[in-house]
Amino acid sequence: MSEIENHQNIAKSVARAMKKKGWEITFPPTDTEEYDFKAVKGELCAAVQVKNWKRAIGVPQIRKFIEFLKLPMGDEFNRGFFVTTSDFGKAAITLAEQSKSINLATFQKNRLKILSQDSGTDVKVATNKDGKTYIGVFTCKGGVGKTTVSAHLAGALALMGYDVALIDLDPQHHLNILLPEGIYLPRKPPNLGSTINVFNYDEYDPSFKERFVICDCSPDFQNNPPAIMEKLNYCIIPTMLNPLGLNKNGHVIVSTLEKIRSLNKNAQLMVLINSLYNEKTTELIRVLKQEYQKLFKKLEAKDKRFKFIDPEECAIRFSKQLFYWGSHIYMGGESELAFKTIGGRCLPKEDFLRLVEYLEESTEIGQFKLL
Ligand SMILES: Nc1ncnc2c1ncn2[C@@H]1O[C@H](COP(=O)(O)OP(=O)(O)OP(=O)(O)O)[C@@H](O)[C@H]1O
Ligand SMILES: [Mg+2]
């Protein structure tokens, strides 16, 4: 049977299973790609998408479905059901739950099972012997998003249910100023909420409860205590995909890499594009990406744990929310992250959950020597 026929049969089986539970099913014209059928019950009018995949569904697929539901074409629906014969990653489950308009379900052995956020398995990333994962956000250049990325990566992990320690290594103490009380993200009972606590280096003790430790590093490398730089499992190097950034950052990134490697031979190092403009891949972006790839090809060949993240796979897009993040220190109000859902979407949530998923994808547990 062809893959398409197989997919259609599975979609029909899912429709039958929903019909049995009282849903009224309508199939759209055969060339519809965005969803498989419409299911109506009471007030609910759902677009149902069915995937017959072997691998787990990730953030990009959920993001695409959220995008569709926001298009005029998605207007008739007030709900989305994403059904797979495989399963979902924890970040994808978190994103769907956060969108408040999408339900996830698995269809295995002819049984439809609706999932909740707690059905996701733990994220599989490298850890140290103390059971914690240490992530540094570092580049020698100022103002490219170290603090923004550190705080919101912590936020994505907290949305997923983890407690996070944010260590403020920058003498400007931006994190301490922005999040003096840390952040508490409530979760649905019976779960406890997650916390993000901000520490100075000398306040932090590895016996603290947090599963993840994220360091907002100082651009001046000497300010970062070697004892913590040695512990990093991952180091994210933010940069921007614009011609001037490319011209200058090439050297900056080479020297950033040398500096990290002088203290840490094992960390997975990743160049992450921040403030990516949200237009579809234009000629300009394609050319800039190629230039970056050329620049880093040699480095990637020399250092197996250095990687330029293809921005089409994972990047932090420019968003007004991130741009104005921190305005509470001037306007009053409590510290918060740029995680508000506006018109049913939140780019920073989508992008930072994807970043967690990307860290998982780039991790082959066996390859990391435990420190
Ligand atoms: N993806 C984004 N979209 C929009 N604005 C962004 C984004 N990322 C960062 N910014 C903005 O860019 C500015 C610099 O970011 P940030 O302070 O995080 O950089 P930094 O590398 O920590 O700087 P420093 O070297 O001074 O510590 C901030 O005003 C922030 O709001
Ligand atoms: Mg900073």
Image (cartoon, rainbow, N blue to C red):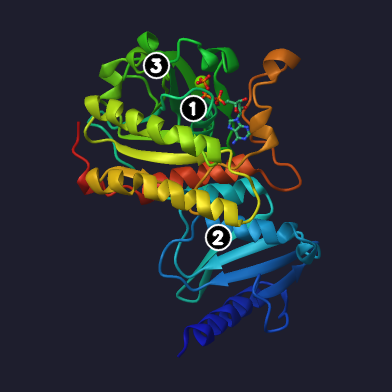
Rendered view: 2 above or below 47: below
Asked whether the residues under the numbered discs 3 and 2 touch, taking CB atoms below 8 Å apart as contact, a structural biologist would say no
- How far apart are the two marked residues, 1 and 3, measured between alpha carbons? 13 Å
Residue occupied by mark 1? 146
Q: Secondary structure at mark 2?
A: helix
Label 2 vs 1, first from the N-terminus = 2
Classify mark 1 as within 8 Å of ligand 1 or not, answering yes or no: yes
* Left or right: 138 in relation to 160: left
- Please state which amino acid type lies under the numbered disc 1: Lys
Residue occupied by mark 3? 220
Classify mark 2 as within 8 Å of ligand 1 or not, answering yes or no: no
Asked whether 218 or 352 is in front, the reply is 218
- Please state which amino acid type lies under the numbered disc 3: Asp
* Left or right: 365 in relation to 245: left
Q: Secondary structure at mark 1?
A: helix
Classify mark 3 as within 8 Å of ligand 1 or not, answering yes or no: no
Mark 1, other Cα within 10 Å: few <14 / some 14–19 / many ≥20: many
Q: Quadrant of residue 83?
A: bottom right
